[in-house]
Image (spheres, rainbow, N blue to C red):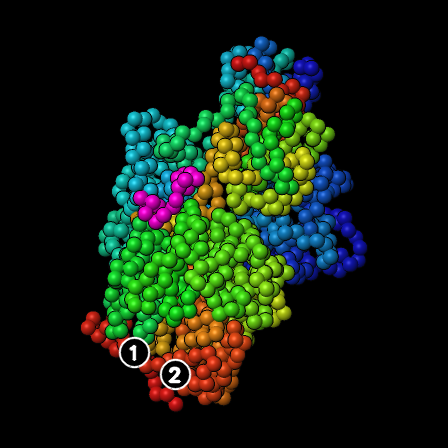
Amino acid sequence: MRSLIFAVLVALVVPSAWAGRQYSATCMILTVDHTRQTFVASCQPIPGFMEAMSMPFDVRDPRELDGLLPGNIVDFTLRVDESSSYAEHVKIHPYVSAEQDPWLARQLKLLRSLSSQKSSPKPLQIGSAVPNFTLTDQARRPVSFSQFAGKVVALNFIYTSCALPTYCFRMANNFGVVQRRLKDYLGRDLVLVTVTFDPQRDTPEVLAHYAQTWKADPKTWHFLTGPLSEVRRVTSMLGMDFFPDEGLMNHSLHTVVINRQGKVVANIEGNQFTADQLVDLIKSVLNDGSIPHT
Amino acid sequence: MESGFGDLSVRLRKPGLVAAVVAVLCAGMFGQTRDSKYPESENEITLQIIVVSSQSEALDILDRVRKGEDFATLAKTRSIDSTADSGGYMGRVAPARLRPELRAGLEGLQPGEVSHPIKTTLGYAILKVLAFSPGAAAAPSGGSAATDALGSVKYSLTVSGQNEAQMPLREMSEEPSFDPTQKAVCQIMSSYSQKDSLERFLAEHKDISLNIMDAHRSLGEINVYIGNMDAAIDQYKQAQEIAQSLNSDAMQQLNEVLGIAYLHKSEMENDIYRKPGDRCLLPMLQSSRYSKTEDSRRAVEYFLKYLSGKPDDLEVKWLLNFAYMTLGEYPDGVPKQFLIAPSTFESQEAAPHFRDVAPETGVDAFTMAGGIIVDDFRNNGRLDIVKSSFDTCAPMKYFSNNGDGTFTEQAAQMGLADQLGGLNIVQTDYNNDGCLDILVMRGGWESPQHRSLLRNNCNGTFTDVTKSSGLNAPTSSQAAVWADINNDGLLDLFVGNENGPAQLFLNLGNGRFKNISHSAGVDRVSFAKGVAAADYDNDGYPDLFVSNLTGPNFLYHNNHNNTFTEVAETAGVAGPTHGFPTWFFDYDNDGWPDLFVTSYFFSVDETARTYLSLPHNAPTLKLYRNLRNGTFRDVTGEVGLDKVFMPMGANFGDIDNDGFLDIYLGTGSPTYGSLVPNVLLRNNEGKSFADVTTASGTGDWHKGHGVAFADLANRGFEDIVAVIGGATPGDAHAMRVFENPGNGNDWVNLKLVGVKTNHPAIGAKIKVSVENEGGRERSIYRTVGSGGSFGASPLEQHIGLGKNAKIMGIEIWWPTSRTRQHFANVGKDQFLEIKEFSPRYVKLTRTAYILGGIKNGRQSQPSSSSSGPAN
């Protein structure tokens, strides 16, 4: 397989410029194999070199793979020469935005952790099982997480009054793309769950209207609302924070992928990945969702 | 570029369409938003879109399209936009409602042509212009959230500390056992426990990290909230040092933060908030410049630092110009490339010049935001002023009118001193005993709190009767209106809430109310910021309107049987989907109530665009003219109101007694950077509204809240009482009492008293037939009420009559008894009381005086007529 991919790479490179070259890559980790010293990632296009695609990469130094988890956005240098290619200086690209909204959410999260009277539960680690929760979907049906046992679940958070299109709308739109591209898996193997953190205003009817933008099938893409306390329980377990701010919300962005065994495989923060990278990640979990050893 | 559509109709249409599209794009678009319910082909185009993640992919798609591949198929297989399944078909779109980069990418395109890849929200977009077909479905406004111009609005930078300050209360509110009494809420809001936690954290952690930077910024915000500007600036500087070490983009943002903090400090140092005078009014004259200039200079430095990296930032340019104004160096001292020209602020026409007489009158409250009522609570013919405060620990203020041009604060004597907080208040007479009661709304913008119903005991005191009234359950609200929805003579209460369904409280007549919102069908959930009531279809029963901050508005038509039907969409009043203050008024005097709804965005950028006549990304405020058939027409553009301000408190009145209702908007938002002037809009004979702020001297740059129009001194001219003050203790400000200079026009003041209809006559309709000079006859219409949804004017109706007026007749319609009174040949320039069923009106004796009183050394006002002789 590797040699086939390499052959593809060779085919894309201009033959006359056949010397050692290096490229900057930005990719989302799909799987990591420490024993084979390789990782598979879904990458953004490298202009003049390759289109967006997912493929395996070798590393020379096994320590490059330390701490890498599915869903991590990484930057690395891809070195290509006559006989091989490998990735080096692999760095996780943290989601740090100086845009006002995510900065404020981060600030308030810190303040809450310092000054809160009650201790908030620690968020789930990668590999932990997701406890059951029950909320109500856009068709006013009760939905419990336990009813998805055996299926891969992709989960994200929105509120319908979100003013910024690159935030909640983009998150939901990503799932709209997943709904299209992974149509064959939906229902039987894959379920999409979008939880509102503004349950007081996002009633099932409001969510149903919002879901219409993507013609979401309520049987396979649930938009959930419910009592604020239950919503908070779900958001805290997945490390997501929200703070009401004059009719709007300051909040962090999270997309979570949970495998068939009900364990968190990936929890991606932010919006700096493409819908197709998310599709690749979910496909990878559908095919083999086991947690990589570190 | 080969057109894909070669039929004749398109060829004929093409030149006009292209010319129109280009004209629309180049005309600077005065924010015209064409409601897609009333399409006009020149202002709309039909579009198809493909969005992909990368530029290289977009170029590939473009290449395929040019080679003849089907656009729709490419959309279905490759597009990540929500329209992919429909082949990328968007429908009819008004270009003005698209994001700026999409508008720019469409420029010059003919039907059948395709744009270059446009970098936009979700990736790279390729747009295809289709042949215009009027039958095509209209896309909602500018398409989806990804393409609508609304998503381009630049929100103002938050420098207020409000989020930090509210955190403990919000957290407490989620505890089921917490009862948000006024005392409990005050106690939590004044403890500032977060300040201690942050100071401790920063003492223990000294590393250079984002967390520490965030902690410094948070501590800065809390100090800003309290008004400790030196401490705040110190914290922001420390945050900026860390940002610099981390090479973070936060550096830039902190330049603006520091500029705003220094500017606020400058205002405090120069005592602008306590003793403003002329100094924060448009037009900032050189003579009003600040005497202590160091902090304004520092502000200028920081704004210039910011602009060197982002020279196009309109908000910072705006603040820079204001900072130069404070130094007396505007416009000449402002660097040319950042100058906002003085012509931007000039009024297009003359206007009466008002003067703030608050200090002389004794209405000198130095307070945060709040609501206001001006009315005669003691039944002594004098208008008192009541002010509530957004400060959860501040008691209500009651300015008692001494009858000599001065007021004395005496909330304690009235039994009101232990009423704390409340962003908005409104008067009523729920028990029909002839003494006006007060409703206090709390929890607006915050977590739920109890409202208060204060019964006037008719002896100069009030009693809080909320607990036994049925109105006690806590909600987040600042919107309430009193209306007799079933014409039983008792005033019912409609409350718009932010955290749940609206409530309709039926007055049971025994001091108790019953919530019938569910059976009435008015319990939709929204973030309601304003409610209004009027019988918009003249069928004898008042209808209800809800202005929502997010999502469409609601118009509830009264079905006459304690139920309502929601009809905003079909009536044409669902927009602007970001509403705040609202009211019904007959702006064109045709006898039918029209609807005014504001749009509210936390964006100095959008407001600056109004002043600079740049295209808007946000929807503008709306004026809906009543078409007399249950629907309204959006006449906003026609009357010149297609503007975006940041209106909070607002109200209407007649500043020049010409008989046409003018509008005053209190503007701003919590951040210390939203320095935008209040706005006075003069109604020109029901045909247009002109911004006369600068000429009128009422353009206060600070945060305008409750507004009331009232003839405070019995002169027959309406003064404007405006609460100025922000959402934080550090942003408190003196109130303004803008005294009307008077004019030569005539007027009449009618106090209606219900007998079968509710006692204060809310909902009663007035028609004054008047003949002006030259024999011109016209009618002037009013409905008894307190005016707008945030700020309450007196229930007695002051009516301007124009020049040399002769009142041919006054007609009153009483909705509960369904009776009409006619009075012919009534004398002008006087105060009258009209009682239901009575064959005669009563002339009231009111003595005119000078606001501020003779003892304060004020000269007599020229050309003001006091109570003239009855004819």
What label does residue B121 carry, if any?
Answer: none
Q: Is B566 on the left or on the right of B226, as rendered?
A: right
Query: What is the chain letter for disc 1?
Result: B
Q: Quadrant of the C terminus of chain B?
A: bottom left
Q: In which quarter of the image is residue B386?
A: bottom left
Do discs 1 and 2 belong to a common subunit? yes
Q: How crowded is mark 2: few (under 14 residues within 10 Å), some or many (20 or more)?
A: few
Q: Mark 1 points at which residue?
A: B848
Q: Residue furthest top?
A: A35
What amino acid is labelled 1 in the image?
A: Ala
Q: Can residue B522 be seen in this view?
A: yes
Give the mark count: 2
Up the image or down, B860 lies above or below B771; here it is: above
Q: x, y (%) of residue B18?
A: 67, 56
Q: Mark 2 points at which residue?
A: B842
Q: x, y (%) of residue B459?
A: 30, 68
Residue drawn at the location 57% of the way across and 36% of the way down: A135
What amino acid is labelled 2 in the image?
A: Val
* C-alpha separation, residue under disc 1 versus residue under disc 2: 18 Å
Which marked residue is nearer to the observer: mark 1 or mark 2?
2
Residue drawn at the location 34% of the way across and 88% of the way down: B869
Q: Looking at the image, which is closer to me, B598 or B388?
A: B388
Residue drawn at the location 50% of the way across and 24% of the way down: A124
Q: x, y (%) of residue B330?
A: 33, 57
Residue drawn at the location 65% of the way across and 56% of the way down: B44
Sequence-wise, which precedes: disc 1 or disc 2? 2
Q: Is mark 2 on a helix, strand or loop?
A: strand
Confirm or deny contact between disc 1 and disc 2 (CB under 8 A).
no
Q: Is residue A52 visible?
A: no
Residue extent of the magenta highlight: B170-187
Q: Is B8 on the left or on the right of B341, as rendered?
A: right
Q: x, y (%) of residue A185?
A: 70, 28
